[in-house]
Image: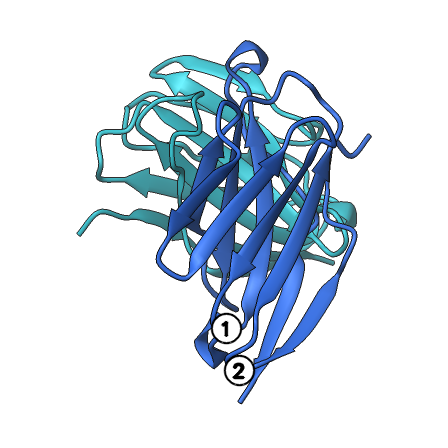
Chain colours: A blue, B cyan
Amino acid sequence: DQQVKQNSPSLSVQEGRISILNCDYTNSMFDYFLWYKKYPAEGPTFLISISSIKDKNEDGRFTVFLNKSAKHLSLHIVPSQPGDSAVYFCAASGVVLGGKLTFGQGTILTVHP
Amino acid sequence: EAQVTQNPRYLITVTGKKLTVTCSQNMNHEYMSWYRQDPGLGLRQIYYSMNVEVTDKGDVPEGYKVSRKEKRNFPLILESPSPNQTSLYFCASSLSFGRGTEAFFGQGTRLTVV
């Protein structure tokens, strides 16, 4: 039972354009959502997060949007750069769930120069 | 430098031969966990620990053991490895749990069981 789903295994965009990565979840008990970025041969690193009481959080080129009614969140990267090419994981947690992170399957982003 | 260190980075072993993957963090974090990453499945939690001597099962604990005798160390033990445990393993730590506390990950251990 995949509670956090990233339905696009891969995404390819041109440098300078917007990258939009999507994530859906099913468990209403999730109250915090995070995005992690992973380069080959490295562990995932934290990118940005959002609380369920907000609908948007911005950090430089990265913005996460949360639509609670649709149980959907997205990560926008503007403008995209070749160094953004990596695997992006969406993750969710909930205090009542013990706080553990539940991850999606990941989306491979490739940004072409 | 704040980090989570896993060893070894790569390991090839035979079915049934006990092995331990070590994990150590230098951030005085209370919460530590182990994940495995498999194609199409993302990262799945194996075990977690909320503090010394406190451990609990994650989503895929079968075939694994852990211990937390010291705050900084959280080894993953495979008593009798099988080929379906061939995977990429990550250890992670965080200051606490819940409220989206950022988790720091090790570089990973690629395990192959033949």
- How many residues crowd around disc 2 within 10 Å: few (fewer than 14), some, or many (20 or more)? some
Q: CA distance from mark 2 to mark 1?
A: 5 Å
Which residue in the rendered view is the most extreme toward the left? Answer: B1
In the rendered structure, which amino acid carries the disc numbered 2? Glu
- Provide residue B110's location: percent of width, then percent of height: 57, 58
Q: Residue at x 59, y 66 (%)?
A: A19
The local crowd at label 1, few if under 14, some if 14 to 19, many if 20 or more residues have their Cα within 10 Å, is: many
Instruction: Judge left or right: residue A1 versus residue B26.
Output: right
Check the image and name the residue furthest to the right. A1
Q: Is residue A65 above or below residue A67?
A: below
Check the image and report above or below for B30 versus A104.
above
Q: Residue at x 47, y 77 (%)?
A: A81
Q: Which mark is residue A15?
A: 2
Out of B56 and B111, give the one closest to the viewer.
B56
Where residue A104 sits, quadrant-wise, is: top right
| Up-down relation of residue B89 to residue B26 (above or below) | below
Q: Is residue B78 visible?
A: no
SS label for mark 2: loop
Query: Does residue B59 lie above or below A105 as drawn?
Result: above
Residue B63 placement: quadrant? top right
Q: Is residue B5 visible?
A: yes
Q: Nearer the viewer, residue A86 or B65?
A: A86
Q: Position of residue A39 (x, y in %)?
A: 49, 66
Secondary structure category for the residue under label 1: loop
- Can you give x and y, in whole percent of width and height, for residue A37 in the image? 49, 57
Residue B32: % across, % down: 41, 29
Mark 1 = which residue? Answer: A80
Q: Are marks 2 and 1 in contact (CB under 8 Å)?
A: yes
Taking depth in this image into account, of A88 and A69 the one nearest to the observer is: A69
Give the label on residue A72, or none: none
**Amino acid on which the number 1 mark rests in the picture:** Ser
